[in-house]
Amino acid sequence: MFAAVDLGSNSFRMHIASHDGDTIRILRTARDPIRLAAGLDSHGNMTDAAMQAALECLTRFHSILKTFPLDAVRVVATNTIRIAKNAPAFLPLAEKAIGYPIEIISGEEEGRLIYMGVASTLASSNERRLVLDIGGGSTELILGQGQEIERVESFSIGNVKHSQLFFPGGRIDAASFEAAIVSARSYFEDAAPPYYPQYWSTAYGSSGTIRSIADAIAKNNLGDGTLSRASMDALKQRLIQFGHTSRIELLGMKPDRASVIVGGLAILIGVMQELGFERMMPIEAGLRMGVLWDLQWRATKRDRREQSVRGCLQRFHADEGRAKRVADIAGLLYTQLKPTADTYARYLYWSGLLHEMGLAVSQSGYHKHGAYMIANADLPGFTTREQRVMSIMVLGQKGNLRKIEDALADPDLAKAILALRLAVMFMHSRIEVNLDEMRLRMKNKIELELKSGWFMHHPTVSFLIEKEKEFWNEIGVDFAIKINA
């Protein structure tokens, strides 16, 4: 049983579901229209009121989550928390309230998860499709075929800010609508060509905004009743007649959506005009369903992150033999170090695989280049936090440890970095690691216990280990070598 929590710019939402062998079935849902994007002040900070409302919602979600026997929970945060300047101060409070780590995902990762949710709902269809999601703070365009994602982009335009910018105070008129549509088109103009209709057969709208627009059109007999540009124009005219968001009364439109629906409709019309297509299908699937499927696939060893790492190795022409050797040795040493949890085990393995990717930039300082690339690359399946952890490991694989000294305060992370440093050293020295010949411990100090004669068989390592002792001693960690008879 899994749970997916989506901390969106419009609403916080939650799905609790189980996999029945064929599909994922939703057991419980919850939604709270927090309007976090509307709670950003002029300096780009979430206001105290917005944060308090968010924390109260997360506390309620936690009370629901703890009543289910959950195998895994994933909490993802999107655009507003991505861009809020005070997000670092808010996140610890939010994680305490929900009881789980919160992952700030990139717009591209958000798009990929949205597509996964849509594709899973459409079963095994091999059609070429465009998926559009209009959120409170960003809009995603995803092109794919069947289950495969071919292209994904995230645009910094969402219905909350667009509504505030072009319909201030809730006033609606024809001139404001046209300005809002033209502005929306400008966001997509340069990126549009790969998404033109000749590259796909069906367009799907996955967001709550698009579904609300579709419901309003269908239930109020506007246009032809479908999500077509003619129907959207009819809805636009009806909204102009209302004159103000507070006076909007349409069947199928929840009152809490009325204030942002005008901006969302302008964006939707702008996208369709710029890409040049006439209609799309609303679909009851998206980010949360994608997160649930991602959890299911991780549980069944079909982790997208593994594919991302392998793809990265190939893209940057890394030596896969050397990469796997380091990853395997690091894993063996890390197990011997007995971490308190397996939190970093997989990140250590992936960092070992990627430890030389910086060679694609330069031979000198490749660990620094690799760390930067990992922290900033678009790696499907990974969160910003996960990439930062791997970046620290790759940066710490060699050289002085002062550059990552803060990270070493986490005992398990320190053990992972030690394991990676020694693995890189042994790989360079072409040493076949035999755990029967060495014992590695790390508590208050590092102890490397070796069999007598080990240095005689590996003379160059003696110099490297002495340097390693110096690096650890510089940050106040003793590194002792013990030779057994």
Image (cartoon, rainbow, N blue to C red):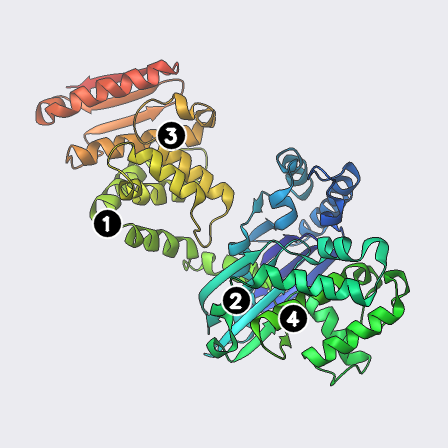
Question: Nearer the observer, disc 2 or disc 1?
Answer: 2
Give the mark, 4 or 1, whose residue is nearer the N terminus.
4
Q: Nearer the viewer, residue 355 or 169?
A: 169
Q: Residue 430 at x, y = what percent?
A: 14, 36
As drawn, which residue projects farthest toward the right?
A: 247
Residue at which label 3 appears: 415
Instruction: State the separation of the CA atoms marked 4 and 1.
Output: 41 Å
Q: Is residue 236 left or right of residue 99?
A: right
Q: Are marks 2 and 4 in contact (CB under 8 Å)?
A: no
Q: Nearer the viewer, residue 171 or 480?
A: 171
Q: What kind of element bears circle 2?
A: loop
Q: What kind of element bears circle 4?
A: loop
Instruction: State the separation of the CA atoms marked 3 and 1.
Output: 24 Å
385 above or below 24? above
Instruction: State the separation of the CA atoms marked 4 and 3.
Output: 45 Å
Q: Quarter of the image holding residue 56? A: top right
Q: Residue 294 at x, y = what percent?
A: 50, 59
Which kind of residue does numbered mark 3 sit on?
Lys
Question: Nearer the observer, disc 2 or disc 4?
Answer: 2
Give residue 19's mark: none
**Which quadrant, please, contains the C terminus?**
top left
Give the mark, 2 or 1, whose residue is nearer the N terminus.
2
**Image point 18% across, 34% down: which residue?**
428
Q: Are marks 4 and 3 in contact (CB under 8 Å)?
A: no
Question: Nearer the observer, disc 4 or disc 3?
Answer: 4
Which kind of residue does numbered mark 1 sit on?
Glu
Residue at which label 2 appears: 192
322 above or below 338? below
Residue at which label 4 appears: 284
